[in-house]
Amino acid sequence: MSGARPARTLVIVGNGPGEVAGWAIPIAAEARAQAARCGAASEVALCLPPCQFASGQEEAAAAASGAFDQIVPPREVARVALGLRGWAPAHPAAVLHVGGDLWYSRRLARRWGAPAYAFVERAHVARVHRDYTRIFVPSTELRDRLVHYGVPAGKVVVTGDPRHDAVLGARGGPAPSRNGGAPRVTFLAGSRDAVFSAVFPFWVATAAALRRRLPEARLCAVISPFVSPTVRRETVGRQQPTIEAAGLEVGDGGWPGVVGSDLVLTIPGTNTLELAILRIPSLVVLPLSLAPHIPAEGIVEWLTRVPYVGPALRLRLARRVVRRLPYVALPNMRMGRQIMPELIGSVTPEHVAEETARLIRDPRARAALARSLESLPLEVGASARILDAMQAEAA
C-alpha cells in the first residue's frame, strides 16, 4: 500500500489487567508502528470502561507502555456512553472492543458514528453481533461456535491471540538461573488487589515449606505491576518475618522477571496461557479457601459482595464451578486436555511444596511439562492481522 493514510483515531475499549496488557497494548503498539510506516497522522486512544475485573492500575500501566496518545478513565467513559458531554476522538474513529461489557463499545461507536469491531475469546458476542462490522477471534473453534449461534461466517475473522505478541515481545532475553545454578521457583500471586492480598500469604507459607525441602533453591515472588503500591506494601509488610526466614526474594516486574524459572507456581488466569506461550513449566494452584477473593462475572459479583452472606455464597458457587469444569488453566481449556498440571480443592502450602519439590528434583518431569506446552501453537502477528482487517474494511 502506498501513500499516507488519512488521519484516523483507533479507539480501543477494554479494562482489566489481562485485557490491557495482553490485548490493548500490543494492538496499540502495532497500530502506531503501522501509522509510522505509512506516514499517517493518526492517534490511538484507550477507553477504560467501568469493570469489576479491573485492578485500578490499568491507566498507569497503559501510560507506562507509551502506546497510547490518550487514555480515558472509567468515569469519563461512562459519561460519554450515557450521552453526556466528554472526550471525543480528534479524527474519524474506529472502535475496537477488547474487553469489559460490550455495551460500552457499542454505545461509544454509536455516539461517534464510528464502525465497531470486537476481539473476543467467548461466544457471548453472538447476541449483539449486528452492532459489529467484524468480530475477531483467536481460534477456528470459536469461529465455528459463533457461526452456529447465528453470526454470519463472513463477519468472523480468525486472527490468533494478541497475547502471543505481548508476551513474546516483552520477555527480553533468557534469564539464566543464578545463585550458583540453583533451581529457581517463581511465585505469581495475581494482578488484582483482593486476589493478591489473599494469595500472597499462601505463597509465602508455601515458600517456607519449600525451603525446608529444598534449602538450596532460589525462591522468587514477582509482583504484577497491576497491584496497587499501597496493597503491595501492606501485604508484603505483614509477611516480612516469614519472607526473610524463607529466603524469598520479592520483586516487581513483568515477564523478564519470570523467564529463566525452572518452575512457576501460579493461580488460574490469563498468566497460565502466557506461561504456556513462553514454554515455562508451571503448576496451577487453586485452593478453594481463596475462592471468595476471586472476582465473578455479571450479577454474581454484586450478589456475592453482600456482607456476611456474600463470601459463603461465592465459596459455594466456586465449588460448583470447579466440579463442573474439567480444567481451570486456560492452556488446558484451549487444548481440551491437561498440558499444565493443576492442584485444586483442599490444597495447603504443604501440599504445594511437596509437589513442587518433587518436580524440582525430577528434571525429566519438568522437561516433559515444557514439551507438552509446545502443543499450544504460537500465533505471533495477531495484532497486525486485526488491524489489517480493519484497514481493509475501511478502504
Image (cartoon, rainbow, N blue to C red):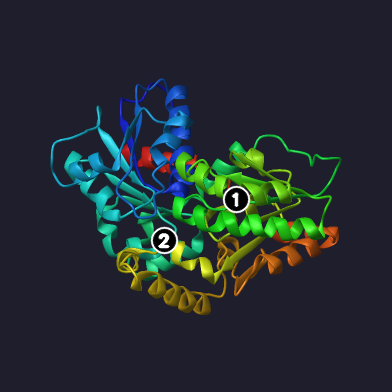
Foreground residue among 352 and 339:
352
Q: Secondary structure at mark 1?
A: loop
> Can residue 376 be seen here?
no
Q: Secondary structure at mark 2?
A: loop
> Is residue 101 toward the left or the right of residue 31 in the image?
left
State the residue at coordinates (66%, 52%): 242
Q: Position of residue 346 (x, y in %)?
A: 60, 75
> Dot 1: few (<14), some (14–19), or many (≥20) neighbours within 10 Å?
some
> Is residue 389 toward the left or the right of residue 91 in the image?
right
Considering the image in quadrants, where does the C terminus appear? Answer: top left
Three-letter code, disc 2: Pro
On screen, residue 137 above or below 166: below
Nearest to the eye among marks 2 and 1: give it.
1
Q: Position of residue 73 (x, y in %)?
A: 30, 38
Q: Which tag, 2 or 1, sits closer to the chain's start?
A: 1
Q: Position of residue 203 (x, y in %)?
A: 63, 57
Three-letter code, disc 1: Gln
Foreground residue among 353 and 173:
353
> Dot 2: few (<14), some (14–19), or many (≥20) neighbours within 10 Å?
some
CA gap, disc 2 and disc 1: 24 Å
Q: Which residue is mark 1?
A: 239
Q: Which residue is mark 2?
A: 295
Specify the label residue 297 is tagged with: none
